């Protein structure tokens, strides 16, 4: 039986990583494989220099670019509430540690600095911090993400229902996590922790998880077949989604974008007409032998001329585009 006492120490980052991908959780917290990226290192430095500025007034070289009037407003917070570390327990009794970037004791606001370019953060992180404060005798009223690259603060008032939802989420993730860790402690089989292939892109463990163990042709073939299987499933899923959108005329909004059908113009050309037209303008038809709309547009033909030479067809492609605003 494998001893895994330290694995079950609680934090938001552990819960969030386990929910995102159990196998990544396994590599980081069970195997203890640490990693760093330039973005993570930048974030660490900025957080350290912000804390130093807020507690001592010293302006570090890296953080100066972010010290706007909005940020300087928080220099009045009592130093003990900067990088504010609190212990608390989850509903199941698991001990957690929360390190809150800033608790503005003047307005009872929980604030978390963000250094990424993406303005998409999980509000459950702030509610977990709010719960930590409540268990330690504080009464937080506002929750805020501050996106330093945009000098933009997004603040919401604490919602008791969302706090309860967050505590329920903690319990659900903990239950699954406890089961997986227990099974692994008994079997030693890392396959107890499932892979979430949708999270592989950008994952620092992807090489270990998917590629590093390919040491012979048989394993390479297995991976190739697996990729083919995924591609077939993806194509089938896209066809099904396209059919649904064609039948309903809807657009589907997800966290990362909008799925819609986009019209695409194409032409079915009369070869004889195109050949004669190209000769009539003093060009060699052989140069445009493919007779595609893209090729013929090199002659700077208008859509009206293209329609005289062939039949316009409008088809629809399934595309995911960025959400506006």
Image (cartoon, rainbow, N blue to C red):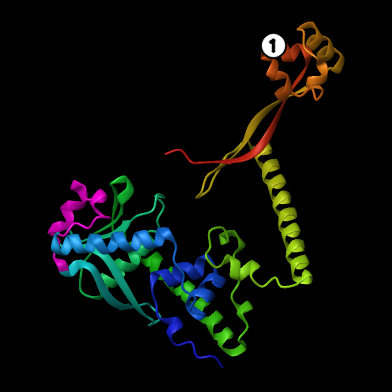
Q: Is residue 323 above or below residue 310?
A: below
Residue 195 appearing in the image? no
At x 78% / y 69%, what residue is drawn? 217
At x 87% / y 14%, what residue is drawn? 272
Q: Nearer the viewer, residue 174 or 193?
A: 193
- x%, y% of residue 279? 81, 9
Q: Is residue 127 left or right of residue 242?
A: left
- Label 1 neighbourhood size at 10 Å, few (<14), some (14-19), many (20+)? few
The residue at which mark 1 appears reads as 304
Classify residue 247 by image quadrant: top right
Q: Which residues are magenta?
A: 58-79
Could you tell me which secondary element the residue under label 1 belongs to? helix
- x%, y% of residue 51? 22, 63
User: What is the residue that sits farthest to the right in this orientation?
Assistant: 272
Q: Is residue 234 above or below residue 217?
A: above
Q: Residue 84 magenta-drawn? A: no
Q: Is residue 287 above or below residue 193?
A: above
Q: Quadrant of the C terminus?
A: top left
User: What is the residue that sits farthest to the bottom in this orientation?
Assistant: 1
Residue 5 appearing in the image? yes
Q: Is residue 277 above or below residue 157?
A: above
Classify residue 165 by image quadrant: bottom left
- x%, y% of residue 189? 63, 83
Q: Residue 69 magenta-drawn? A: yes
> Looking at the image, how many numbered discs can be counted on the residues?
1
Q: Nearer the viewer, residue 5 or 284?
A: 284
At x 59% / y 90%, what residue is drawn? 186
Q: Nearer the viewer, residue 253 or 199?
A: 199
Q: Quadrant of the N terminus?
A: bottom right
């Amino acid at each position: 039986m494998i001893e895994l006492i330290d694995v079950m120490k609680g934090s938001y980052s552990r819960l969030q990583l386990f929910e995102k991908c159990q196998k990544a959780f396994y590599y980081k917290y069970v195997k203890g494989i640490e990693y760093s990226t330039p973005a993570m290192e930048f974030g660490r430095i900025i957080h350290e220099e912000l804390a130093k500025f807020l507690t001592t007034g010293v302006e570090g070289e890296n953080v100066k670019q972010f010290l706007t009037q909005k940020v300087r407003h928080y220099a009045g917070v009592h130093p003990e509430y900067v990088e504010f570390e609190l212990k608390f327990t989850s509903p199941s009794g698991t001990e957690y540690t929360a390190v809150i970037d800033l608790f503005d004791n003047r307005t009872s606001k929980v604030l978390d600095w963000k250094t990424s370019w993406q303005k998409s953060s999980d509000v459950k992180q702030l509610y977990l911090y709010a719960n930590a404060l409540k268990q330690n005798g504080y009464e937080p009223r506002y929750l805020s993400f501050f996106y330093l690259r945009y000098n933009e603060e997004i603040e919401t008032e604490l919602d008791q229902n969302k706090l309860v939802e967050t505590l329920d989420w903690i319990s659900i993730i903990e239950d699954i996590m406890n089961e997986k860790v227990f099974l692994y402690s008994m079997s030693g089989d890392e396959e107890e922790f499932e892979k979430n292939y949708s999270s592989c892109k950008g994952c620092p463990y992807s090489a270990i998880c998917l590629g590093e163990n390919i040491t012979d042709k048989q394993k390479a073939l297995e991976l190739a077949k697996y990729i083919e299987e995924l591609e077939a499933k993806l194509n089938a899923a896209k066809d099904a989604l396209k059919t649904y959108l064609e039948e309903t005329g809807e657009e589907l909004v997800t966290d990362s974008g909008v799925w819609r059908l986009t019209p695409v113009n194409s032409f079915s050309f009369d070869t004889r007409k195109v050949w004669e037209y190209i000769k009539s303008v003093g060009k060699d038809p052989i140069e445009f032998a493919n007779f595609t709309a893209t090729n013929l547009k090199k002659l700077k033909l208008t859509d009206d001329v293209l329609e005289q030479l062939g039949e316009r067809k409008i088809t629809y492609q399934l595309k995911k585009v960025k959400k506006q605003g």
